[in-house]
Each structure stands twice: as structure tokens, then as C-alpha cells.
Amino acid sequence: MFCRSTFTGILLIIGCAACVDRITIPVPTPAAYPVVIDGFISDEPGPYLIKVTQAFDIESKSSFRIPISVKSMTLRDNQGITDVLTEKGNKGFYYTNFITGVVGRAYTLHIELLDGRIYESKPDTLYPSGVVEKVYYTFRQTQRSNGTTEYGYDIYFDATSGSRNHYNFLWKFNGLYQTDIPCCTCLADLVNPVPVVSNDQLVHEGKFKGVKAMYVPVTGWTFQHGVYAKVSQRSLSRQAYDFWRIVGAQLTGTTSLFQPITGKVPNNFTQIAGQETPLYGLFYATSSNSNGIYIDKSDVPRPEYIPVLQLSPATANYDPTKNTCQGLFPNSITLSGG
């Protein structure tokens, strides 16, 4: 793939003893590649971040995105408040200055690109988040096909909607645990990368009851100390709900994090001016609430259910280049050491 606009085509020479055929294949200029928007406003304290990237080879599993700057970006509500966002820190990272999300108000994002293309999002209403009232668990043991037994916890939660007849939510589940390895102390996360949206079938008497959030396995890593299971609930408008529902469905069927950002996913932007080019992603308004529960290693019914870790410089498979927080746990940070 060529990314420079000076290339107008690729010259292919098919040679044989008697002829040379020239075939010109058009290569789109960078302006023809779609822009991707990722961001939201909430009723939590700002500033709020909007990311702008440009997607290349968007229909491929090997697609990639690069951050880009824009000419201007403004965010306004339906009460006449307008905030001009500022690019700070990283290229393509735009932050609000003073606007704050308010439940009941609708928000519109206006973007003008450097090449003159202008896009505007449809107004998105900020609904109340409801309350994650309770997070709880049940212990489970499962017989594997090889005759061994797996132990773990199923995490459940109950939540209110916060608004009558509005049950559109985005749920995020995290399993945070501290673990100690020879180099350092890590904080790792069993986060599920697939977006999970609410389902009306889980509503009982106006509340979500007994919704299964995640599964936490009992391993030597997770229960060196214990696991904090966290449930977050974000309110969504109908258009935002449809976006995350389709993204979740696509992520379930692919290993590419970029594949969902395709023409198959709806967006809430309208192009106002410039060369007609699709824009992907979503800007939405949301309110959030979270709750969690800590499962200590002493809560595991029997100590022998927790496997003994064999990770030290004395073990045969010890690799100091891999035995780092990020090397062993992709979703982790280093708390100390390292």
C-alpha cells in the first residue's frame, strides 16, 4: 500500500519474449481514506477526549489507523453552550475546555478537516446511568476432558435503569488482581475486550436481575492475593446502543480490533461539505455508574484449589525477557520494581 499522494498508480510490467503490457492500477490519495472518530461526553468531570484517526485498508484484518489533526472541532449542547476543543499531548487527541455533560441534554460534535471536509454528528441525548446495586458471585468447579478439575467464580450483578422504559446500556467488566513476580509487582486485568450491551430480556420488574458479568478462574496468578470484580454501566441513546451492539457482534467473530470499523457498522455523522468520503466511529453522550466486590484468596473454599506458582530464576523455563508485567499479562501495569 502506498500512502503518499504523489503516487497515482502502480506500473506492472508483464514480460514475455514478444510483448510488454502496462497496467495502471489507481491508488487512492490519503484524502480518500475514511476518518474514524472515537469519543464521548459524560456527566462526570471533564475534560473529555475525542480521538481522530485515518483508517487505511479498512476492509482488511491488517488495517491500521494513524492519528490526524483537524482544522477545527466544536462540541455544543441544545441549550446553546459551545466548546472549541483543543489538540493536546498527542496528535489527534482533542480535549474539551469547559463543557460538562448534563442528563437530559443533547450534544452535537462538529468537525472540519484540513482538506475542507466537514462532518457533524446527530444530536445524542444523555440518559441517566441507573445504579449497579449489587455485585455477587458463586463458586463453580468444572471437570475438564483430561480428568482434572477447574475452579472459578461466576460474577453476577443487579442494576436499575435510572429511567422508566429506558434499558439501553453498555456494560464493562473488569477482574483486577495484584500478582508478584521476581522482577516486580503487577496489577493485571481480566477485562473482556468485547463490548457487552444490555438485553431487555434480563429486565424483571424494571430492574436487571442476576446478569452474568464474567468468569474469574482460580489460578496461581489471580489468587496470589485476590480479585476485585468490577461492573460498570454506561447509559446509551438508541443510536449509540445500535453501534455498540454491532461492534460487539463483529468482535465476537473476529480477532481484528480494526475490523469492526467498517461500512457494516453504523455511525451518527452526516457530511456537510467536501469530497464525499465516509466517516466511521461514534460520538455519544453517556452517564456511568459502577460497583464491585473483592474475592480474597481466603474465600476460596480449599487452599489446595489454588495452584502453586513455579516462577523463579531457579526454574528451567524462566525467561527474564518475558517475565515482566506486560510480558506475562497483556492488560497490566507495573506497580513496583521492573
Image (cartoon, grey):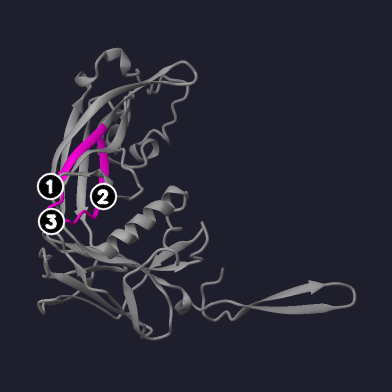
Q: Are the two marked residues, 1 and 3, in contact with CB atoms closer than 8 angstroms?
A: no
Q: Are marks 2 and 1 in contact (CB under 8 Å)?
A: no
Q: Name the residue under label 1.
A: 131
Q: Which residue lies furthest to the right in this view?
A: 18
Categorize mark 3 by other alpha carbons within 10 Å: few (<14), some (14-19), many (20+): few
Residue 271 x %, y %: 35, 80
Q: Which dot marks residue 163?
A: 3
The amino acid on which the numbered mark 2 sits, given as a three-letter code, is: Asp
Residue at point 44%, 64% (across, down):
264
Image quadrant assignment for residue 188: top left
User: Which residue in the structure is indicated by mark 2?
Assistant: 200
Where is residue 138 drawn, in percent x and y? 24, 26
Residue 290 in view (yes/no): no
Give me the residue at 31% from left, 33% from top.
215
Mark 2 vs mark 3, CA separation in Å: 14 Å
Which disc number belongs to residue 168? Answer: none
Q: In which quarter of the image is the C terminus?
A: top left
The answer to whether 58 appears left or right of 19 in the picture is left
User: Where residue 209 sits: x, y (%)?
Assistant: 20, 39
User: Could you tell which of marks 1 and 3 lies nearer the N-terminus?
Assistant: 1
Query: CB under 8 Å between callouts 2 and 3?
Result: no
What kind of element bears circle 3? Answer: loop
Quadrant for the N terminus in the image: bottom right
- What secondary structure prevails in the magenta region? strand
200 or 43: nearer the viewer: 200
